[in-house]
Image (cartoon, rainbow, N blue to C red):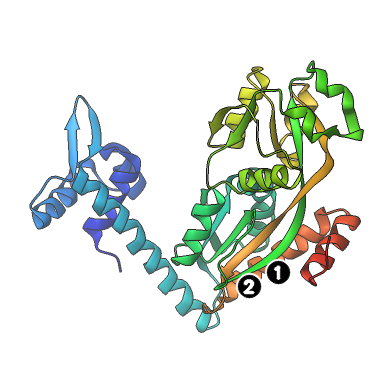
Amino acid sequence: MADRRLKVFNTVARLLSFTKAAEALHMTQPAVTFQVRQLEEHFDTRLFDRTHNRVTLTDVGHTVYEISERIFELYDEMDRRVKEMTGEIGGALNIGASMTVAENMLPALLGNFRQEHPDLSVRLKVGNTESVVSMVEHNVVDLALVEGSVTNKNLLVETCRRDELVVIMPPEHELAGYGDEGVPVEKLAKYPFICREEGSGTREVVLSYMDEQGQSEGWDVCMELGSPEAIKGAVEAGMGLSIMSSAGISKELKLGLLTAVPLKPRLYRDFSFVRQRHKFRLPAMEQLLEFSRHYCRESTPMHDLEVIQHTANGEEA
């Protein structure tokens, strides 16, 4: 149903290549160029700059691309809802995830889900917790999985999994000797510290923990980075210590690139599902939710499940 010219433009803008867009759309390159020129004539302005064998978006092109993405998401939602209301499960489900969840939990979860529901495609948008929660608020995604707290009372927040945050360091670091007994949090203050950017759920949890332990002052934050992978690389290079999810460092531990030591007292946080409280409940979303709940129960230690249940019931963990 979508405007053909807009669909062609969107594909070129996403790939930044007329040749690749033609291949993706099973069209000839002249046909792709013709459709884009028609759209440019409609707006009476250029949407692409073509210089030095490179294709880039103009300022107007960026605006058209951003809005076209939202248009196609709405088309997908309309198609999906009609199919589901008439008893047919299919189409696309838009979900969001914070970086930690997307890197450590979702690949296996979504892979298993797609095996059971091959007709239902999933579109994943990744950002820090703050940006992903905003996507839920503005109907960009149907469901999100995030770490950290969510304060918007118009959203439903359901804890799904418990995660421990640990101190990561090079294997030869002097604090590595603390082992499983945990490193006292006050011991960390004299070392350079690498943390996530503002808006990150991990950063929020770590700063709250430091404040509770009376250690909010005197930290030497040498670097703020925008992803767990960047932080791990910086720590491996000896640039400082960091605190991050124990679930995200299994490969580095096996390869001997990093060492992880628990904090003392230990630091835990929850992964949570977030969705709108009054939004139409799509059957496809309910299927993904129930599948995810089961996946989290199966992959979470029994003690942590009990803590999650107590927390959900309003008791202190």
Residue at mark 2: 286
* Residue 261 found in image quarter: top right
Residue at mark 1: 290
Task: Specify the amino acid type for callout 2.
Answer: Glu
Task: Specify the amino acid type for callout 1.
Answer: Glu
Examine the rendered structure and indicate whether residue 87 appears above or below residue 303: below
Q: Quadrant of the C terminus?
A: bottom right
Q: Nearer the viewer, residue 123 or 266?
A: 266
Q: Secondary structure at mark 1?
A: helix
How many neighbours does mark 2 have within 10 angstroms: few (below 14), some (14-19), or many (20 or more)?
few
Q: Position of residue 206 (x, y in %)?
A: 68, 43
Residue at 64 percent across and 45 percent down: it is: 202
Q: Position of residue 145 (x, y in %)?
A: 62, 57
- The numbered disc on residue 202 is none
Would you say the residues marked 1 and 2 are in contact, meaning their CB atoms lie under 8 Å apart? yes
Residue at 58 percent across and 50 percent down: it is: 98
Residue at 57 percent across and 68 percent down: it is: 275
Q: Nearer the viewer, residue 119 or 309?
A: 309
